[in-house]
Structures are given as C-alpha cells and as structure tokens.
C-alpha cells in the first residue's frame, strides 16, 4: 500500500521533471539560442511582467498539497470515542 501511494505521489514529480528536461534541452539545442524560450526564461519574463505570479503559484501548490494531505491521507474516524484528532 505504501509503495502504491509513493508511486502515486512521485509520478507527477517525475513527469514534470522529464518534461522540464525535454523542453530545456530542445530550447538549448536551437540554432539561435537568443530566440529560444526555455521554461526558466518564460517564468522569469512572466515574473517581470506580473510580480505576483510566483507567490500565487506557490500558495496554490501549497494549498493543493495541504488539502490532499488533510482530506485524503488523514485517517479520522468520527465514530471512535478514543480518536481525539477531530
């Protein structure tokens, strides 16, 4: 069961890391590197145009993670009188 949860939680991280490596590698190998838009450059330009982009994305990611941990992984039984977590 733990291996299943670990795979479920690590799969999106590995997918994002692979896509990042593919996109960055493709952009770096372009013949005109000044015109290539990498993910890093895109985030930097978006941050320069809209300074609240990065904090809002981080808050959103943290909120989704917290909601996942609380609502799915927290095992609370309201019928159990000895369970005082709720």
Image (cartoon, rainbow, N blue to C red):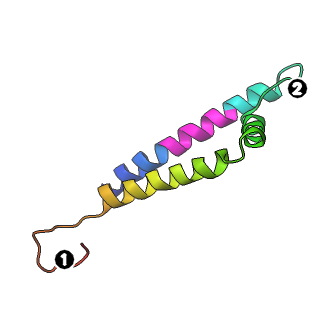
Above/below status of 69 relative to 22 = below
Image coords of residue 35 (percent x, y) = 86, 23
Write the start and end of the magenta stretch as one range. Answer: 12-21
Badge 2 density bin: few <14, some 14–19, many ≥20, Cα 10 Å: few
Q: Nearer the viewer, residue 49 or 19?
A: 49
Image coords of residue 63 (percent x, y) = 47, 54
Above/below status of 68 relative to 31 = below
Q: Residue at 88% of width from left, 19% of height from top? A: 31
Q: Which of the 4 image quadrants contains residue 85? A: bottom left
Q: Residue at 11% of width from left, 73% of height from top? A: 80
Q: Nearer the viewer, residue 5 or 75?
A: 75
Q: Is 64 one of the magenta-colored residues? A: no
* Secondary-structure class at tag 2: loop
Residue that carries the numbered disc 2 in the rendered image:
33
Q: Where is the N terminus found, in terms of image quarters?
A: bottom left
Query: Is residue 46 toward the left or the right of residue 60 in the image?
Result: right
Q: Which of the 4 image quadrants contains residue 18? A: top right
Q: Residue at 58% of width from left, 39% of height from top? A: 16
Image coords of residue 53 (percent x, y) = 65, 44
Query: Is residue 13 toward the left or the right of residue 38 in the image?
Result: left
Residue that carries the numbered disc 1 in the rendered image:
83
Q: Residue at 31% of width from left, 57% of height from top? A: 71
Query: Is residue 67 toward the left or the right of residue 31 in the image?
Result: left
Question: Chief secondary structure of the magenta span?
Answer: helix
Query: Is residue 81 toward the left or the right of residue 72 in the image?
Result: left
Badge 1 density bin: few <14, some 14–19, many ≥20, Cα 10 Å: few
Q: Report how far apart the C-alphas of labels 2 and 1 lie in the structure.
A: 59 Å
Q: Is 20 one of the magenta-colored residues? A: yes
């Amino acid at each position: 069961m733990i291996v299943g949860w670990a795979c479920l939680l690590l799969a999106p991280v590995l997918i994002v890391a692979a896509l990042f490596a593919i996109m960055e590698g493709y952009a770096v190998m372009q013949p005109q590197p000044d015109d290539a838009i990498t993910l890093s450059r895109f985030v930097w330009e978006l941050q320069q145009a809209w300074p609240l982009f990065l904090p809002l994305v981080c808050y959103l990611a943290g909120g989704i993670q917290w909601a996942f941990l609380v609502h799915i992984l927290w095992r609370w039984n309201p019928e159990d009188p000895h369970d005082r977590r709720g």
